[in-house]
């Protein structure tokens, strides 16, 4: 597309992934939930591809962002 920046496309893909995630929380059947979660994962993969095309580094894994809780 002319005039569309990759970062805007990646942000749009992440927004669609977030919507699929919230729809999956409300799904009535496990089949629907699974399909929505797969759609979410695919949107996130497209966002990562757009970031890669822009030369951005991949995001760290979710476990790396977690803060350990000391007992």
Image (cartoon, rainbow, N blue to C red):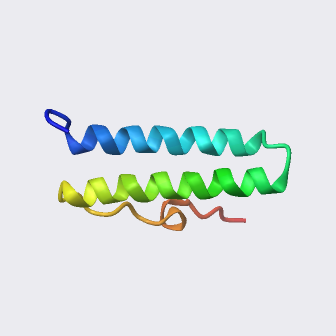
Is 34 situated left or right of 12 in this image?
right
**Which residue is painted at 75% across and 43% down in the image?**
25
Locate the C terminus by quadrant. Answer: bottom right
Taking depth in this image into account, of 60 and 18 the one nearest to the observer is: 18
Which corner quadrant holds the N terminus? top left
Q: Residue furthest front?
A: 1
Q: Which residue is drawn at 41% across and 64% down?
A: 60
Occupied quadrant, residue 63: bottom right
Q: How many marks?
A: 0
Q: Is residue 16 left or right of residue 20?
A: left
Image spot of residue 24 (x, y percent): 71, 45
Q: Relative to 48, say whether 15 is above or below.
A: above
Q: For this rendering, which residue is in front, 3 or 62?
A: 3
Residue 14's spot in the image, x, y percent? 44, 44
Residue lying farthest left?
3
Residue 64 sits above or below residue 7 on the image = below
* In the displayed structure image, the side of residue 50 where residue 64 appears, left or right: right
Q: Residue furthest right?
A: 28
Answer above or below: position of 40 versus 2: below
Residue shown at 43% from the left, 59% from the top: 45
User: Is residue 65 or residue 68 the one in the foreground?
Assistant: 65
User: Measured from the top left, where is residue 36 in percent x and y?
Assistant: 66, 50
Judged left or right of residue 27, residue 68 is left
Percent of width and height locating residue 11: 36, 40
Q: Residue at x 20, y 35 (%)?
A: 4
């Amino acid at each position: 597309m002319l005039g569309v920046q990759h970062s805007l496309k990646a942000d749009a893909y992440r927004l669609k992934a977030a919507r699929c995630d919230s729809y999956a929380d409300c799904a009535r059947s496990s089949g629907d939930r699974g399909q929505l979660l797969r759609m979410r994962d695919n949107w996130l993969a497209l966002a990562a591809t757009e970031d890669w095309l822009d030369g951005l580094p991949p995001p760290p894994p979710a476990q790396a962002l977690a803060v350990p809780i000391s007992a």
